[in-house]
Image: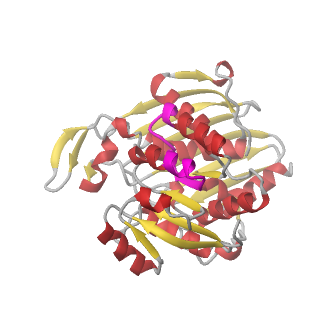
C-alpha cells in the first residue's frame, strides 16, 4: 500500500450537494489521504468540479473512476439507486470503499454488497458519520467510564426542514418509496443509529409512521400530489439494559436547535444537541453534562465546516483500518443490520429483536 492513499469520489458537482459540501473538504483535511479523482454525471460537470476543487483527474462516469489503477479508495456519494452497481464494481476492482448511507435500496441489496465486500477482503465504511462526531465520542467515553452509572432513560427529538409540504424538483425522487431514500430511511436511520451507539442494543420497539403533510407540492411550477412516504416517525421501546427510550423524527420543521438527545443516568445527565436544519447527520453536535456546556476537543478537524467534520472522522477511521489492518470503522455489516431494522419500522408495528437474532454492539 502506498504511504498516501489516493481517493476518488463519485457524485461531486459544483452546483452543491453532500459530496461537494462534506466529502471533498473531509478528504482534503485527513492526513494520509489525497483526493486524486472525482466523477460526476457528465465529463463537463466533472471537469468543472475538478477545477473548482483542485483535483487532478475528472471522469464523466463512475465506472471509469473505479477502473483507474491509481485510485485506492472509492467513495460512492450518488443517489441510493445507483449505489449497488457502483459499489459492486469498486469491490470487484479491489478498491477500499466508503458508501453514503443508505448502503442499498433495502436489505437484499445491502446484504449483497456486504457479502461482496467480505469476499473482496477490502476495508469498507458506511456513512453513519454521527458515530465519529467528537461530541458523540466524548459522550461515549463518559458513559463507558461508568461516571453516569446505569442508564435510566433516553429521549430524542430529531427534526429536519426537509420532507415538508413544498418539495423542490431536485428532491422529488425522495418521495418515491422504491428509492429507499426518504425521511425514515435517512433522518430516521441516522437518529436511531445514534441512539444505539450511545445507549446500546434495542431489545424491543414499537414504531408509528405518519404523514403530517399528506398533500405536497412538487417541482417548479409546484404541482400538487399525494405524499406516499412518511414525514413523521414515533418510536418507543427499551434497550437490552432495560432502559426505555422515546424518539420523534419529524419533517417540515425549522428551529434554532433541530436536534436534542437527553440521556438520564443514575449519577448524572447528558444532552447532545445541535445538528442542522436539514438533519442531525449534517451538522455539528454539542454536549451538555449535568447542565454545563462541555468543551469538545475536535482536534485537527476543528477548522472544518459543520457538514464536513463528522465525515472527516469516518475517513480517518477508514484510513487507520487500511493502514493497520484493523476493522474499527462502522462497516457494511452494521449497515445491513440497520437496514433490516428500518425495514421493520415500515412492516411491523411491534418488533422484538430477540426473535430476529440481530445484535447491536456499541461499535
Query: Residue at the spot x=82%, y=49% of the render?
Result: 144
Residue at the farthest top position: 355
Question: Is residue 155 visible to us here?
Answer: no
- Looking at the picture, how far across and down is residue 28, in whole percent? 57, 75
Q: Is residue 84 left or right of residue 94?
A: left
Residue 281 x %, y %: 53, 55
State the extent of the magenta-drawn residues as a range: 87-109
**Residue 97 magenta:** yes
Whether residue 358 is in magenta: the answer is no
Instruction: Kindly tell me whether residue 195 is visible in this rendering.
Output: yes
Counting every numbered tag in the picture gives: 0
Looking at this view, is 319 or 334 the one in front?
A: 319
Instruction: Tell me which colouring the rendered structure shows.
Output: secondary structure
**Image location (x, y in percent) of residue 119:** 65, 40
236 vs 18, left or right, is: right
Please indicate whether residue 253 sits to the left or right of residue 190 in the image.
left
Can you say which quadrant of the picture contains the N terminus? bottom right
Choose top left, top right, bottom left or bottom right for residue 333. Answer: top right
Question: Is 193 situated above or below 318?
Answer: above
Task: Give the residue drawn at x 47%, y 81%.
Answer: 54
Residue drawn 72% across the image and 34% down it? 243
In the depicted view, which residue is nearer to us: 146 or 172?
172
Q: Position of residue 335 (x, y in %)?
A: 59, 41
Q: Closer to the camera, 223 or 161?
A: 223
User: Is residue 276 depicted above or below 264 in this figure?
Assistant: below
Amino acid at each position: 500500500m502506498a504511504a498516501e492513499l489516493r481517493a476518488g469520489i463519485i457524485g461531486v458537482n459544483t452546483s452543491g450537494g453532500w459530496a461537494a459540501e462534506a466529502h471533498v473538504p473531509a478528504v482534503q483535511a485527513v492526513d494520509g489521504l489525497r483526493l486524486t479523482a472525482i466523477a460526476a454525471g457528465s465529463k463537463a460537470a466533472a471537469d468543472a468540479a475538478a477545477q473548482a476543487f483542485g483535483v487532478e483527474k475528472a471522469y464523466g462516469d463512475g465506472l471509469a473512476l473505479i477502473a483507474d489503477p491509481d485510485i485506492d479508495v472509492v467513495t460512492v456519494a450518488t443517489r441510493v439507486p445507483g449505489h449497488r452497481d457502483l459499489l459492486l464494481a469498486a469491490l470487484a476492482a479491489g478498491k477500499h470503499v466508503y458508501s453514503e448511507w443508505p448502503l442499498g435500496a433495502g436489505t437484499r441489496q445491502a446484504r449483497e454488497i456486504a457479502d461482496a465486500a467480505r469476499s473482496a477482503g477490502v476495508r469498507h465504511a458506511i456513512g453513519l458519520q454521527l458515530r465519529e462526531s467528537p461530541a458523540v465520542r466524548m459522550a461515549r467515553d463518559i458513559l463507558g467510564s461508568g461516571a453516569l452509572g446505569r442508564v435510566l432513560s433516553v429521549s430524542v427529538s430529531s427534526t429536519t426542514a426537509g420532507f415538508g409540504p413544498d418539495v423542490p424538483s431536485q428532491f422529488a425522487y425522495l418521495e418515491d418509496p422504491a428509492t429507499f431514500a426518504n425521511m425514515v430511511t435517512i433522518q430516521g436511520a441516522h437518529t436511531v443509529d445514534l441512539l444505539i451507539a450511545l445507549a446500546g442494543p434495542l431489545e424491543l420497539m414499537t414504531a408509528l409512521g405518519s404523514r403530517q403533510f399528506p398533500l405536497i407540492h412538487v417541482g417548479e411550477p409546484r404541482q400538487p400530489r399525494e405524499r406516499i412516504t412518511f414525514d413523521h416517525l414515533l418510536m418507543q421501546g427499551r434497550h437490552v439494559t432495560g432502559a426505555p427510550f422515546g424518539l420523534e423524527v419529524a419533517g417540515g420543521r425549522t428551529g434554532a436547535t433541530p436536534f436534542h438527545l437527553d440521556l438520564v443516568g443514575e449519577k448524572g445527565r447528558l444532552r447532545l444537541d445541535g445538528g442542522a436544519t436539514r438533519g442531525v447527520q449534517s451538522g455539528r453536535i454539542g454536549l451538555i453534562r449535568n447542565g454545563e456546556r462541555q468543551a469538545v476537543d475536535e482536534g485537527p478537524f476543528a477548522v472544518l465546516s459543520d457538514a464536513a467534520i463528522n465525515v472527516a472522522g469516518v475517513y480517518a477511521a477508514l484510513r487507520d483500518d487500511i493502514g493497520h489492518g484493523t476493522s474499527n470503522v462502522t462497516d457494511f455489516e452494521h449497515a445491513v443490520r440497520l437496514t433490516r431494522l428500518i425495514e421493520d419500522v415500515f412492516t411491523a408495528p411491534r418488533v422484538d429483536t430477540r426473535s430476529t437474532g440481530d445484535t447491536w454492539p456499541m461499535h
